[in-house]
Every structure is written in structure tokens, then in C-alpha cells.
Amino acid sequence: MLLDFIFSHLRDMVLWVVIFSLAGAELENYSTVISNVAFSALLSFTMPMQLAELRSMLLELVLGPDDDGKVERNKEADVEGSRKLKEMLMLLGAIILGAVVTQLDWAVWFQRWPLPSVVLYSIVRALLYYSGKTPEKVDEKVE
């Protein structure tokens, strides 16, 4: 069980590094490679969904459910999946916004990849975390 957890997150980390590399992240020096791997680890462990889950959910949205209406669908699971998908897309948007829009001057250290994306991702992640803390949810956890 623990090994499955570790290997799934390692697979996600490798996929994120490949995605960043294909999108143009620098791989020329050691420090940028380490920062890409560190950012990939952060994404792998803090994203609401793994990349395999995202792929299967997007395919289900495009192609329709696999069960052909035979199995009763759990509405709570659908709502939870929809919420996770929205959070995931918002976080991916923050990464893209940090990578593309904030790159005004590559010579300045705080505007080089992946720092703007990490900062914007962290801000959006914190906002999503605190916006999910409604008074009803806090009361349920206390009881």
C-alpha cells in the first residue's frame, strides 16, 4: 500500500518534469533541474488529483461514462470529483499564468522559472484551502 502511494507520486513527479521540459523549462544547469524536480514534487503531493485521475476524468467528460447507465452513480462522488477538477484546473491556470504572463524580465532572479509559478500556485492553493473552510465544515469537525 505504501509502495503504491510512493510509486504513484514518483510517476507523477516524472510526468510533471517531462511536461515542464516539453513546455520549455531550462535544463541547462543543475540548479534549474533541481528547481524543476522540487516544483514537480510539490505539485505531485499537493494537487487535489493525480495526472492519471485527471486524464480519466477528462476522458469521461468528453466520451461519457463507461457504465452505459447500468450502475447508479454516486452524486456525492460526482460533486467531489467536479470540485477536485475545478480546483485542479484553477491550479493549472495559476501555473500557466505564472509561467507566461509574469515573465517580464528573465534577467531578474525572482522572475526566472519556476519561481513565479511556485509563488502563484502557492497563493491560489492557500486561497482554495481557506475558501473551503466554511463555518459548517468547521462545526462538523469540532463535534
Image (tube, rainbow, N blue to C red):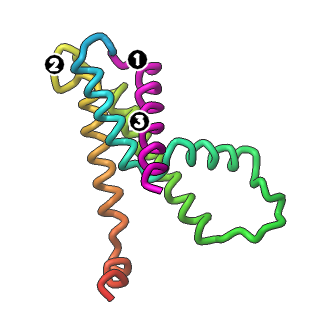
Query: In front of the other: label 1 or label 2?
Result: 1
First to last magenta residue range: 1-26
Q: Badge 3 is on which residue?
A: 13
Q: Is residue 37 above or below residue 89?
A: above
Q: Badge 1 is on which residue?
A: 24
Residue at point 51% right, 59% down?
A: 83
Residue at point 40% right, 32% down?
A: 96
Furthest residue in direction bottom, as rendered: 143
Residue 22 x/y as whole percent: 47, 19
Q: Badge 2 is on which residue?
A: 108
Residue 9 x/y as whole percent: 43, 43
Look at the numbered discs 1 and 2 and tell me whether their residues touch, using CB distance below 8 Å.
Answer: no
Q: Give the Cα distance between marks 3 and 2.
A: 27 Å
Amino acid type, callout 1: Gly
Q: Quadrant of residue 141?
A: bottom left
Left or right of 62? Residue 4 is left
Amino acid type, callout 3: Met
**Callout 1: SS:** loop
Residue at point 79% right, 58% down?
A: 67
Residue 65 x/y as whole percent: 75, 54
**Callout 3: SS:** helix
Q: Give the Cα distance between marks 3 and 1.
A: 17 Å
